[in-house]
Amino acid sequence: MSIHDRYRLSAVINARGTYTPLGVSRSSDGVAEAVAQALPEFFVMAELGDRVSETIAQVTGAQAGAVVHCTAASITLAVAATMAGSDPRRIASLPDATDMHNRVVMPACHVVDYGHSNLQGIRLSGAQVDLAGDETRCTVEDLEAELDGPDVCCLILVSSRLTSGPPIDMVAAIRAAHRRGVPAIIDGAAQFPRVADLLATGADLVLMSGQKYLASPTAGLIAGTWPLVQAVRAQEKGIGRAMKPTKEAVIGVIAALEEWQALDRMKWEADELAKVTAFAEAAARIPGVTATVVPDPTGLQVSRAVLTVPNAHDVATQLEAGVPSIYVMTDRLTDDQLVLELVPLTKDEIEVILTRLWSLLT
């Protein structure tokens, strides 16, 4: 009996990408085994934190790293670290940020909703947010105007396909912050494969999801400078208590990082592109379907299939209503387009998608 049958849960084929409401990703057998080995064991959690910091540093090139409960938690705790540092009194005071620098500067076009607004994640720390520019555009000059104000604790930039407006020159923005003695944080939730690029911008902290493309258990990964990472870890004596990672999550992250380090990235990228290309070619044989392959807009080496189909909204609804439920990206439905990401899917699951599309469209 499958776990879905045992607990009366819907079977799902997830072609929507690393989407939290669908369980995000699939961990490898090796990661699952490491998690299973950790569950019945005891650990000195501070020691485990040191080991994962060493592993994050080794894999990413950062000075140090930390794991918290999830990426949303990492936003809150990274901001808290820039306000309170490792000062026990300040840590105990948060989210009351009285007498602390507590203004976060952020581009207005980097306000995104991951299921809740990233603004709320910042405000949970006790910080206030000053938005630069507007929803359509933010320049480095806009950021500098806000950075020149009083009580600025950090600059936050977001690397995501959900941001709006033209891309911001992150290197120039971070240099502007550093000229003013302000640390810079990049929220790169789904950007773990690009962590080296994000750290190369000069960011003091880079925040990433463990459970997305790294495919670890649910965890927020933080890579960055030694002092700020230690300040993040220190928040566990304050508001971070509610955002701490489990022992099995930390072990799972270490196992996933070790697998990532051993991965032949060029072969993986070639295999994934071949998978998407073969799917698009097969889908294009369905009457009325036009299929193309598009790259990820943020620079991830992940391609997606875009299917232009009649009545895409109805097709997406029927795909979800079937058994198993098939979920696709729906942000282009107004253009009658379905977008599919196939990274975690098996050959059999891809065949199920094609069979269902044939059934619905012919």
Image (cartoon, rainbow, N blue to C red):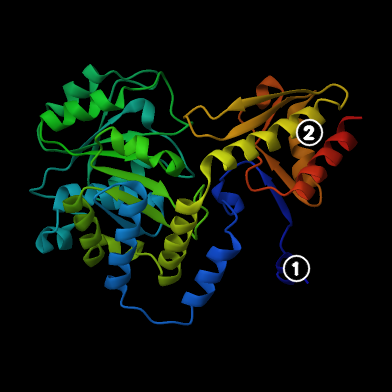
**Identity, as a three-letter code, of the amino acid under mark 1:** Ser
**Identity, as a three-letter code, of the amino acid under mark 2:** Val
Residue 343 percent location from the top left of the image: 63, 43
182 above or below 246? above
The answer for how far apart the CA atoms under marks 1 and 2 are is 28 Å
Q: Which quadrant of the figure contains the C terminus?
A: top right
Label 1 sits on a secondary structure element that is loop
- Residue 286 visible (yes or no): yes
Which sits in the foreground, 70 or 197?
A: 197
Q: Which residue is mark 1?
A: 2
Query: Taking 126 as reference, is 98 left or right?
Result: left
Quarter of the view holding residue 43: bottom left
Question: Residue at coordinates 9% horizontally, 33% vertically from top-left?
Answer: 150
Residue 302 percent location from the top left of the image: 56, 35
- Residue 329 visible (yes or no): no
The numbered dot on residue 136 is: none
Question: Residue at coordinates 41% horizontally, 41% vertically from top-left?
Answer: 117
N-term-proximal mark, 1 vs 2: 1
Q: Which residue is mark 2?
A: 315
Residue 137 percent location from the top left of the image: 36, 18
Quarter of the view holding residue 316: top right
Q: Which quadrant of the figure contains the N terminus?
A: bottom right
11 above or below 47? above
Question: Residue at coordinates 54% horizontally, 30% vertically from top-left?
Answer: 296
6 above or below 175? below
Question: Seen from this angle, which residue lies furthest right?
Answer: 362
Q: Nearer the viewer, mark 1 or mark 2?
A: 1
Query: Taking 157 as reference, is 194 left or right?
Result: right
Residue 313 percent location from the top left of the image: 73, 30
Query: Taking 124 as reference, is 250 left or right?
Result: right
Mark 2 surroundings within 10 Å by alpha-carbon count, few (fewer than 14), some (14 through 19), many (20 or more): many
